[in-house]
Image: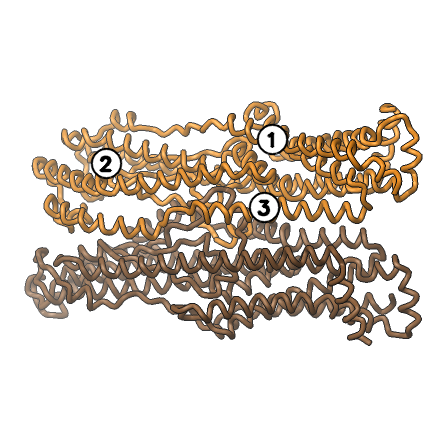
Amino acid sequence: MIWKIARKEIKETLREGRFRIAGIIVVALLSIAVVISYNYYNYVQKQHAQASSNARNLWTSQDEKNPHSAAHYGTYAFKPKSPLSLIDQGVDKFTGISIFLEAHRRNEAQFMAAADQTGLARFGDLTPDFILLFIIPLLIILMGYNSFGKERENGTLQLLQSQGVSPRKVALGKWLGLYIPISLLTLGLFLSAGVMLALTPDFGLFSWTALLLMALVYLIYYGVFANLTLIVSAWTKSGGLALVLLLSLWIITCLAAPKAASNFADALYPYPTRQEFMASVTQDQQKGLDGHNPWNEEAKRLEKETLNKYGVDSLHQLPFNFDGYRMQKGEEHEAEVYFKHYQLLKAQFQQQSRFYSLSAAASPYLPARFLSMAIARTDYGLHWDFADAAERYRLKMMEALNMDFADNSAYGNWAYKADQALWEGIPDFSYTPPSLGQIALSHLSNFLLLITWLAVSFLGLFWITRRI
Amino acid sequence: MFKYNFKYEWRTLIRDRWVQSLSLLLLALCLFASYNGKQKVNKRNQDIAQAVTEVEEGDVAMLSLIDSIQAGLPVDVPSWRQPVQPTAVGNYHPRVVAFPAAPLASVATGQSDLFTHYVKPTLSGEAMLLNFTELSSPVQLLFGSFDLSFVLIYILPLIVIAFTYNILSVERERGSLRLLATQPMKLVHWVLQKSTLRFALLSLILGAGISLSLMLNGISLTATWNEGLSQLLALSLAYLLFWFALSFLVNLLGRSSAVNAISLLGIWIGLVLLVPAVLNQLSNTIYPVPSRARMINDMRVLKSEADKQQDQILAEYLRSHPELVSVEAGNEATAYGWWQRYFASQDVVKERMQPLLEEYDGQLNRQQQWVSQLRVLSPAVLMQDGLQNISGTASSHYRDYRQQVIAFAEGWREFFLPLIFKDKKVDAEIVAQLPEFQYEPTRSGQLFGANLLYILLYSGLLISLGFGLYNSVRREKLLLS
């Protein structure tokens, strides 16, 4: 009986003009969005690959120079684009594309794309995630808002009741009739995206598992919307009111709640301004970490200790260049200060994330968004991971340079020059994002929140359809 | 007939629960939204004020240190940081170059969450290479802000649709349309009168909502009238008019209430969600932003060439670590020579990089101006542009601020270079003459006029389409169906 109802619902929807038009529009938009995203992805990927190899060439083809000069010339670390960013671009537009790795400074990623665009860009891009997150729930609402109301309006409710079928079975049938076309559409999109990605060469990290996990997230998200649509339809007994209520729900869920949550999160756990941040770092570097052990004192102590350790009276008698050694220790000292302050920043970010998790009670959009971004490896967590990896590489690079200077020259010999062997000896920066398992584990809470939404909405549907 | 219409329509509206609740909703949303906007503006102004206070305190300390040094007392500051050296003042006591919030900045967050609002350019720093983006959570940037501009652009049209979707259709469904047709007035005029009345009511509520929320946030209405409030009200009413005109047209198509509602909502989705996204995508495809990755690469090549040139002027390790140069008393000649070479070497970088950066900025500028022309294709984008201009948070404002910062940084440098090369020591008199920054707001009056005009044009077009439709085909269709 359930399947009969489902089939009838689907037939009815397919025959209806408004759904056909809406369906065609959505499919057209999705196709355009996928094509545009694909082209954009290729364009950016090519640019970044070229930029990375150029940066590496410039680094290795440096003339002979003092290693510390090379450290100041520095190099760039470019963030690779993840294949699944084809579907969800996440916060890529709002994070910088590259980090400048130089001596004595930990830099932020520079050149975020949004800073180079106008206010028009803040309306959103026509990307698959825009359609998946905003438009398809609208499609679900359009298809299902009158699901129960039309039975009443057309007079077929009594006919239905006279069949002796339990109202819950009717509800399930209608749910299937609503959900199956949507899930087929979604799976179709993900499969075609997967095929496009698999057929394109140079895609390192594409995995079908990640793609299917992302599809699962969206399927659950649509399940929640299907439930909510049918609950409101069953409850209000009139099509018009149901539509208004569902649209208000959609606006609150997808537009208003995220914005309000972001306002509150920013007000409760604000970030320092860039100037404040740099000023605190500078202060700590001068006065020492937490006021202890400022570098000028530590440097003197280092000098004494080293002289003692090697049993000599002057720095000239050490078997290595003390300047290089001292610069390395200074670099480590500065890095510690940066590490402390970036950890404080990360703590604010984590507090904000916790707040967003709390706000998921008001909107299933939030956990779905965060999960989708995380799986596509375009979320803020990945940016932190990349920045930390770049910093680790920078420190290793500085160590290699400083210690080469220390080991291969005498104290006071600033004319020492290293050659290409040293530049090439430092391996190129390569970044591996965390594995899918690690991502899934760290976002378990969002997953549970989404599942809770699904479970609670199912319960609501069952309760409300105990009697039609 | 009009008086009759007015009286009964007014009574119906006032007594209608639906109307009352929608009005309250609009009011509540305006209040919540402008509260959010004000939070951000407060933070911005506080940050600036704090920076200014710090600089003032630093100045006091600097003056007392100068006194001590001039009096010959020993100080615990290394010689290269002592504020009697012009380089020390130029590098370690920079001024706050701030972009204060416009009076109505709480209306639209715009681009203000992307960029920083104060910088402190130093003598040796390169102003062109300053980072203007603010440290902020990209999640917050992605979601955007629940500000007044969000309420006006996204939610106000929905309220208008809820108010007006069934002006004509409900009469037909109740059966009173034929009665109306017997009245000695054209049906289209009757619909126009009803719409006008509802427009007047909603305008009043909207105006009251905006004014009240601004007042509750401590913004004086009389003071800001010429500073953007009149523009804000005019734009909001024009946008309101647009959606009323749309509703007017859809009603005159003569279909049922349900179909009207769905059509209007479909148009809302199209105009407010889809068209801006499509325009954005189109602009990126037709005229993409010049590539930063390529710019970085070009800059690096130039820098490596510049390095070689600089090395001939001054050894690299001294360039990066000026503190290694000791300025001993009586050894002024060495210091003079050193600083001359230092700035000469910095100029090499500037000479090489500046053309590249200027070219990039020029390309970016042209692209952004082309994109801003696309805004006329959607009332939502026109409205967003108008609101951002009133709040002073459009990307053009930040571009202008960047230029002012760079100009000030040049001026700061011009102030100190003669002192350095004449080897003059800084005293209290010179401190009093330090350049101060005054932000000059850009003029946005012209843009406002254009935006307003386009929205009114669209509204006029829709209303005349409505009339045209009625006169051509619909009259009989409406009455006979």
| Residue closer to the observer: B141 or A126 | A126
Q: Earlier in the sequence, mark 3 or mark 1?
A: 1
Looking at the image, the residue that sits furthest to the front is B472
Q: Residues within 10 Å of mark 1 (few under 14, many from 20)?
A: many
Shown in orange, the chain is B
Residue located at (26% from left, 56% from top): A102
Q: Which mark is residue B275?
A: 3
Asked if the residues shown at circle 2 and circle 3 are in contact, with their CB atoms under 8 angstroms apart, the answer is no
What residue did someone put label 2 on? B83
Amino acid type at image mark 1: Leu
Amino acid type at image mark 3: Val
Whether labels 2 and 3 share one chain: yes
Tell me if residue B379 comes above or below residue B143 in the rendering.
above
Residue B86 position within the rendered picture, expressed as x and y whole percent measured from the top left: 21, 34
Shown in brown, the chain is A
Residue B393 position within the rendered picture, expressed as x and y whole percent measured from the top left: 49, 37
Which chain hosts label 1? B
The N terminus of chain A: image quadrant:
bottom right
Residue located at (20% from left, 61% from top): A301
| Residue closer to the observer: A160 or A446 | A160
Tell me if B108 is positioned left or right of B89 in this view.
Answer: right
The C terminus of chain A: image quadrant:
bottom right
Q: Nearer the viewer, mark 1 or mark 2?
A: 1
Tell me if residue B284 comes above or below residue A442 in the rendering.
above
Which chain hosts label 3? B
From this viewpoint, is residue B220 visible? no
Q: Earlier in the sequence, mark 1 or mark 2?
A: 2
Scheme by which the image is coloured: by chain
